[in-house]
């Protein structure tokens, strides 16, 4: 599966307050784009994924449309439709350095916490999770930033430790390594890359602890606590979080 869908994985068996996260319920990764029949059969019949949450904008949808037959696809545009589309790191290597690219990514994570559009999208997202009993799949373009933050918030609600949340978040770098290495190889054939170019690509195409830390620190600074953020911003009070735990946690 990992070689067919970018950054694909099941979040499961992570220790939380009252047990572990149930297997085969919460999946994350990249889009269901250009899949063969075998992969589609595995997703639908073996993993029994029915609902797909797509965090992408209209520009991304045109570039890599999801396979739709047999799936209930729900669009929740986290970042909005930007007129110029996504920043392509492959075209920025002459203009942006490693520090600048990481600063941009930190700003992205901060904005995903504070922007009304992102808040509304994540609020709807957790409403879907709360009313779901079947395997569900969450994705964006690379399954790392919008999906990464949503997954981290999900784990935080369920009571996972910050260390386990970060470990799961950083798994993206392992699962995306082949894709990133291929991108670097293709770019290097066009122009000999300097180390600054390679570092910049990694800053955009991978994830770093400080990205998620920026989001979490923004939550603490702006809202005082995760509990307050979950309740006031995402509509997930203590009672609703308890209901979420009943769905996604099993005793062990």
Image (cartoon, rainbow, N blue to C red):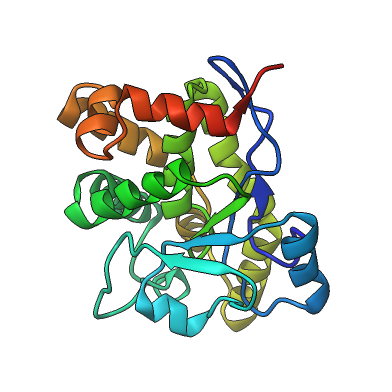
Task: Determine which quarter of the picture holds residue 69.
Answer: bottom right
Q: Is residue 80 left or right of residue 9?
A: left
Would you place residue 215 above or below residue 83 in this image? above
The structure residue drawn at horizontal position 54% and vertical position 62%, both measured from the top left corner, is: 52
Figure quadrant of the N terminus: bottom right
Q: In the image, residue 188 lies at what x, y percent?
A: 62, 74
- The answer to whether residue 108 is left or right of residue 60 is left
Residue drawn at x 35%, y 24% as measured from the top left: 239
Please tell me which residue lies in front, 70 or 29: 70
Task: Tell me, yes or no, if residue 250 can be seen here.
Answer: yes
47, 172: nearer the viewer: 47
Residue 224, located in which quarter of the rendered image? top left
- Going 18% across and 53% down the picture, which residue do you hit? 116
Percent position of residue 84, x then y = 27, 80
Viewer-closest of 175 and 11: 11
Vertical comparison of 114 with 14: above or below: below
User: Which quadrant would residue 79 be assigned to in this image?
Assistant: bottom left
Q: Does residue 209 appear in the picture of this structure?
A: no
The residue closer to the viewer here, 142 or 106, is: 142
Measuring 60% from the left and 48% from the top, which residue is drawn there? Answer: 172
Residue 83, placed above or below residue 45: below
List x then y, in percent, for residue 12: 66, 35
In this image, 35 relative to 118: left or right? right
Locate the C terminus by quadrant. top right
What is the x, y in percent for residue 212? 40, 38
Number of numbered discs: 0
């Amino acid at each position: 599966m990992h070689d067919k869908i970018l950054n694909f994985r099941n979040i499961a068996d992570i220790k939380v307050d009252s047990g572990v996260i149930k297997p085969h319920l919460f999946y994350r990764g990249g889009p269901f784009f250009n899949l063969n029949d075998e992969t589609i059969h595995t997703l639908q019949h073996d993993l029994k994924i029915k609902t797909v949450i797509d965090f992408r904008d209209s520009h991304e949808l045109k570039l890599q449309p999801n396979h739709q037959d047999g799936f209930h696809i729900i669009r929740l545009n986290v970042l909005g439709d930007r007129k110029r589309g996504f920043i392509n790191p492959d075209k920025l290597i002459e203009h942006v350095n490693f520090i600048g690219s990481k600063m941009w990514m930190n700003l992205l994570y901060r904005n995903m916490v504070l922007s009304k559009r992102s808040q509304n999208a994540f609020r709807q997202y957790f409403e879907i999770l709360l009313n779901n009993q079947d395997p569900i799949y969450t994705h964006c373009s690379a399954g790392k930033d919008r999906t990464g933050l949503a997954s981290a918030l999900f784990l935080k609600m369920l009571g996972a430790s910050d260390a386990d949340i970060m470990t799961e978040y950083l798994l993206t770098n392992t699962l995306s390594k082949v894709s990133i290495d291929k991108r670097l190889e293709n770019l290097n054939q066009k122009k000999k890359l300097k180390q600054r170019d390679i570092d910049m690509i990694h800053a955009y195409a991978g994830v770093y602890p400080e990205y998620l830390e920026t989001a979490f620190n923004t939550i603490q600074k702006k809202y005082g606590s995760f509990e307050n953020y979950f309740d006031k911003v995402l509509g997930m009070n203590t009672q609703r979080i308890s209901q979420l735990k009943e769905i996604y946690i099993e005793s062990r």
